[in-house]
Amino acid sequence: MAGMFDFVIAGGGSAGSVLAARLSEDPAVTVCLIEAGGRGDGLPVRLPAGTVAMLPGRPRINNWAFHTVPQPGLNGRRGYQPRGRALGGSSAINAMLYIRGQRQDYDGWVAEGATGWGWDDVLPYFLRAEGNARGADALHGADGPLQVADQPDPRPASRAFVEAARQMQHPVTEDFNRGDNEGVGLYQVTQFHSGPHKGERCSAAAAYLHPVMQRPNLHVITRAQAARVLFDGRRATGLAYRRSGEERQVLARREVILSAGAFGSPQLLMLSGIGPGDHLRQMGLPVLHDLPAVGQNLQDHLDFILSWKSPDTDSFGFSLRAAAAMPGHILNWARHGRGMLTTPFAEGAGFLRSAPGVERPDIQLHFVIGIVDDHARRLHWGHGFCCHVCTLRPHSRGQVRLASSDPLAAPLIDPRFLSDPRDLATTIAGAKLTRALMRAPALQPHLGREMFGLRDGMDDAEWERHIRARADTIYHPVGTCRMGSDAASVLDPGLRVRGVTGLRVVDASVMPRLVSGNTNAPTIMIAERAADLIRRGQ
């Protein structure tokens, strides 16, 4: 028999965890959360360095481990798309980096029809979510559930990275979250900075959901795959899901909310008959509402990595010395919440302009204390460092489509990386700038042989060959259920699905345009604001 709740949420990731916790604060409201993965509270999640075990997807630990369709812009390669599969979603497997983006990103959303989502509108929700170890001020919150901390023990090479930037005349900053993120420094991270969980990852589930799982008005179902939205006419009335090989149903008195992410939410809409009519008919699905924009507008940050071997063993790597030191690292983390295992790996941050005439930072750097090759799926003996560079505001647009009408089948993901030539030009400029920074004097004691055939004097054609051969996502897909004021948008600015009632989407898919940075903090903000909209019936 189907259960009945006021709100049914599909997806317990970053947005779903926030929504379930916030909506169930009202004891008069009942909430059911459906999540395909597990509880997201095991050791690989709690241990910050555990991301290296989950991210590669070999085996699939808390990870959907999706792949794209072949990408012409990447020499026909299929890209890799890790996505969190557990309560907390991708915040359970990511690098924990707390970045909001730039003021202009959100004001740009308003200009594209997302009224009510400008920087001044969303800042209070960033503050509401944030429990920053530095304390509260006009731009930061100290009492929110999401603990935000300075890195407990960044490596000396990461501090050298910041000094190298200073030597190259780049601005240095300690705060990337004031609306203008230009500069180089160390990332703040979503990590417990106090209490019994000090030093552990603070995923969205750990922050919001795990502490309230015993609420009598909150029902969380894990290991359950959402299959489709149920409708009475054009009103959403519940959700069908699969668990233990059986299809079951849960009903919603007030609303069904999709929080399945930039890939999962458009997939669920299409499986439910909402999307491009011709495509749905090709999949053998009835068309409830022909909404061509569903699955369109996919945007992601393409990432190119420059890597060096290193004589410095104070980093992550494979060596006898590293193996001998590991028990001490484990003990330090378990007892004190400190040490090497608290690392986000991407310790050093940079938001820079690819050229002097660029209006605001258009490239992002992640300085990583190890060698990352093919998403850590290809390992190298020894130690080293790498620096990732990505184009912050890509012009390329892709799409998500159904592979079949089977809800258990992975969607067809096509980011169309480098389909707009402007993205390649910015990536080349960013790679050149990054390589120059990495050759500054402060970093030279830490760097040895440069890897993957990069060399002095390369022309743009050579840079292009390297980028097309090795670049891939840095895990920020958004936009596939974009909100806006035009009739062609999937959602209105209240995140309600156009053409039906009782159905919203709340996750990174609602962004009209990709923010200039990592997407987890903005996704949590979206859910915080959505909870207010839902409570007010807007």
Image: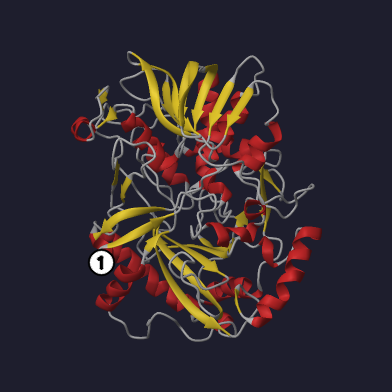
Q: Is residue 435 left or right of residue 190?
A: left
Q: Looking at the image, which is closer to me, 472 or 511?
A: 472
Question: Looking at the picture, how far across and down is residue 493, in whole percent?
Answer: 40, 28
Q: Amino acid at mark 1?
A: Asn
How many numbered tags mark residues here? 1
**Which residue appears farthest toward the front when viewing the image?**
245
Q: How has the structure been colored for display?
A: secondary structure
Q: Looking at the image, which is closer to me, 297 or 108?
A: 297
Question: Looking at the picture, how far across and down is residue 202, in whole percent?
Answer: 65, 47
Report the residue at 59% width, 82% height from top.
446
Circle 1: is it few (<14), some (14-19), or many (20+) Cα within 10 Å?
few
Question: Looking at the picture, how far across and down is residue 151, in whole percent?
Answer: 67, 60
Q: Is residue 104 left or right of residue 291?
A: right
Residue to which mark 1 is pinned: 75
307 to 352, vertically: above or below = below
Report the residue at 27% width, 35% height from top.
293
**Which residue appears farthest toward the right when viewing the image?**
335
353 to 128, vertically: above or below = below
Quadrant in the rendering for residue 434: bottom left
Q: Is residue 54 visible?
A: yes
Q: Looking at the image, which is closer to me, 425 or 381?
A: 381
Q: Is residue 494 visible?
A: no
Quadrant in the rendering for residue 405: top left
394 to 139, vertically: above or below = below
Report the residue at 68% width, 81% height from top.
321
Look at the numbered disc 1 and give the secondary structure of its residue.
loop
Question: Looking at the picture, how far across and down is residue 185, in whole percent?
Answer: 58, 64
